[in-house]
Image (spheres, coloured by chain):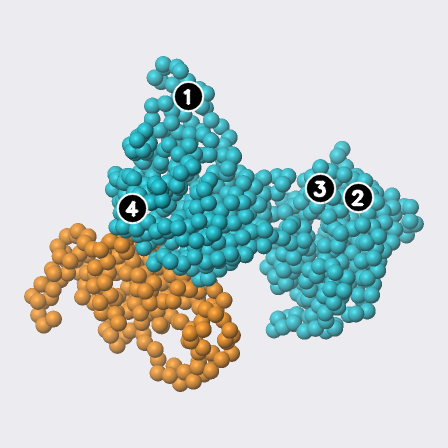
Chain colours: A cyan, B orange
Amino acid sequence: MDQVRHVILVLSGKGGVGKSSVTTQLALSLHASKLHSRPLKIGILDIDLTGPSIPRMFGKDAEESRIRQSSAGWIPVYTDETKEIGLMSLGFLLPSKKDSVVWRGPKKAAMIRQFVSDVHWGELDYLIIDTPPGTGDEHLTIVESLMTETSDVRKAPIDGAVMVTTPQALATLDVQKEIDFCKKADLRILGIVENMSGFICPHCADCTNIFSSGGGSTLAEKYKVPFLGSVPIDPKFGEMIENQNASTNLSVLYPETEMSKAFFPIVQNFFHQMYDKRSFKLVTSLGGHDGRIWSVDSHPVLPLFASGSQDKTVRIYNSDTLQLVHVIDGFHSRSVRRVAWRPVDRPILAAASFDATISINEKIDDDWECTAALEGHENEVKCIAWSPGGNFLATCSRDKSVWIWETTEDDEFDCMAVLQEHTQDVKVVAWHPTEDLLVSGSYDDTICFWRDDGDDWALTCQLQGHESTVWALAFSPSGSILASADNEGNIILWTKTFSNESEAISNSTNILRPSLQEEWIRKATLPHLHQGAVYSIAWINDQVLASGGSDGKIIVYESEKHDDNIWRVSIEKERAHDVYEINSIAWLGNDKLVSGGDDGECRVWHIK
Amino acid sequence: MANSGERRLYIYIYIHVQVFSMSATLQNENPEVKALSQLPTRAQEEEENLFLKGNEGWLWDISDELENVEKIRDAVDAQEIFDLLAKINDPEHPLTLAQLSVVKLEDIEVYDNVDGNSAVIVHITPTIPHCSMCTLIGLCIRVRLERCLPPRFHVDVKVKKGTHASELQVNKQLNDKERVAAACENEQLLNVLNSMMSTCI
């Protein structure tokens, strides 16, 4: 069990409340969670020895599915070839469904201990344990056995218990005993699920409370435990379970049912219990622009942020007081598309415009001046990016080229390279935080990687992973991951696998030396929750990044501590700018985010 | 236009106004033209339903801050969108998009939800498969809808499947927010668009 990340117990005070049904639904809903970057691997351990119902729930006829043994241990029965949901139950070990298990305590305890230590689960995200009703031998044994199984991927031997009850006040009396058991066994209670809460009519889908209602939530309030939600009775669910055969797959059928929609809020609350709940609150809304805000950027050192707008101006704010400090006006004849602070101690801001020029604005002795104007692009400039040292400025345009400018001693800009490999508008450029690597994303759906190979900037890699325009690119602060976002809302994380740098860049005078090449592969795809283009992505650290897009949502993703290939949605803020699209986001410090939208407003958010 | 000579002169003037260069002959010499009476309009029966429509609004949550201007709200439907677009002039012919069947009522989808995610999808049918005016027409429809509809509507303009040789390229251009915004800042193009919309109210 050393690769199992979370262990959950499902308890109930009484029998017949539908614990196995809740266990099954919890497993299927977790597996189908859209909030994770890949389907979660779930294991179900059925220790209801006298009434093992899990095999039946999944349509695994106990007589046909057998548990096999390997050198590593018993192998669970998987629901399908993907091996994402594994089952283990005494039902698989009995010779026949009709056999009863008439065992005394010690034998049951031994069986349970074997289930815990001898089953080879492999890598699992969640192990859900279906227990018999009440509190008995099985419960004590399972808690004891789990406490002894330590693992470095698990925070605690048991993450917690989920209690199932039915709405009547009478049933809840027994749950109180269960809560008491948890307190005595030092188990965290993740929440109460009220099962059989209402009946969904198969004809009109209306829900009627045939038992009384509210028992679960009253209990939750009284004992100060979280209330996860209520599950109704749906006859169609029962039919679906009964009519399974070798060709149907519950993990595919279940997400289409009404029950799974009803269960979804329970899983959301469950995740809030499992992971720290994060709050995302609006601090203030800053208006003033007379047109959409195309870009926001925060200064890496000083407490300043800027917004560039369709109204041809740039507004600069103090990020501590959130007050307007200055308005840069009059230099551009068309929309300001992008603003970028130079990563130096002084306030220097570059502003790129649809008028094909880039203005460099500096605050000198309390006055803002335009110290340089970079011309050269044939048409609209789409993006600018300063190199980490502040010496180079990369710019890109609808003219399909990427220009790299270098600053000279007297703060003048010289164009040192014009890179033309893209076949369409170049939408975005971004620098690597430590290496001399520039990436560009384009309307032609590709991402180009550029490195200085001594003589010139050369194309070292071109990725065709997106099927639509690449709008945003951002390297993680350590530089090990590149995130890219496209017009359909996909966000892909890339990592480098290979580079022939040592061969290609050497002091060799051989003019036929191999050209610099590198290979980047797809590391993970973030959960796809945006319903439209993602225009902006921003990292706060290597494990957390935020995205904003045309659907008006700001989403924050976090990677699992043990595995940075698995990403989870930790905040989903809908309608962040009401009905307007979000064009740009930037982090202000570690806990604040500023977003700019089509409504012309900058909104500052606080995350806890 | 009384005689063909006058008509030809009118067409030549049109060509001079075009920003895009093209040959002296029209792309499509003989388009199929619909008579005004054939175009779909709001039917007479709808007037009887106005009473019901008005009252439905009261069932609606009055405390919604976004719509606090009108308490009785008529949902936007395809006919309304069609009416907004019908009178746009074709850049080539002195006829409207509706008369040329470039815009058709059945190719307009409207999703109007109170709680967000409202969208309008318009499919256009160019008169010939290699029509180079297609992008211009699509752009004009976009601009018209962006000007007339409330901001909650997400607008999508696409070429009807199978009606244009460069369908994917045209769709990609029309749905690229940045390109559309940049194009609308171009004064010459804006003048062409405005002249196309001059017959709309």
Q: Which residue is mark 2?
A: A146
The spot of residue A46 in percent (x, y) is 78, 50
Type of the residue with mark 1: Ala
Distance from Cα at disc 2 to Cα at disc 1: 55 Å
Q: Which residue is mark 1?
A: A504
The residue marked by circle 1 belongs to what chain?
A: A
Q: Residues within 10 Å of mark 3 (few under 14, many from 20)?
A: some
As helix, strand or loop, the secondary structure at mark 1 comes to helix
The residue marked by circle 2 belongs to what chain?
A: A
The residue marked by circle 4 belongs to what chain?
A: A
Residue B157 lies, with reference to residue A150, above or below; the image says below
Mark 1, mark 4: which one is toward the viewer? 4
Type of the residue with mark 4: Glu
Distance from Cα at disc 3 to Cα at disc 2: 11 Å
Q: Which residue is mark 3?
A: A154
Query: Which sits earlier in the primary sequence, circle 2 or circle 1?
Result: 2
Q: Which numbered dot is residue A529?
A: none
Q: Name the quadrant containing residue B107.
A: bottom left
Mark 3, mark 1: which one is toward the viewer? 3
Query: Which sits earlier in the primary sequence, circle 3 or circle 1?
Result: 3
Q: Which numbered dot is residue A380?
A: 4
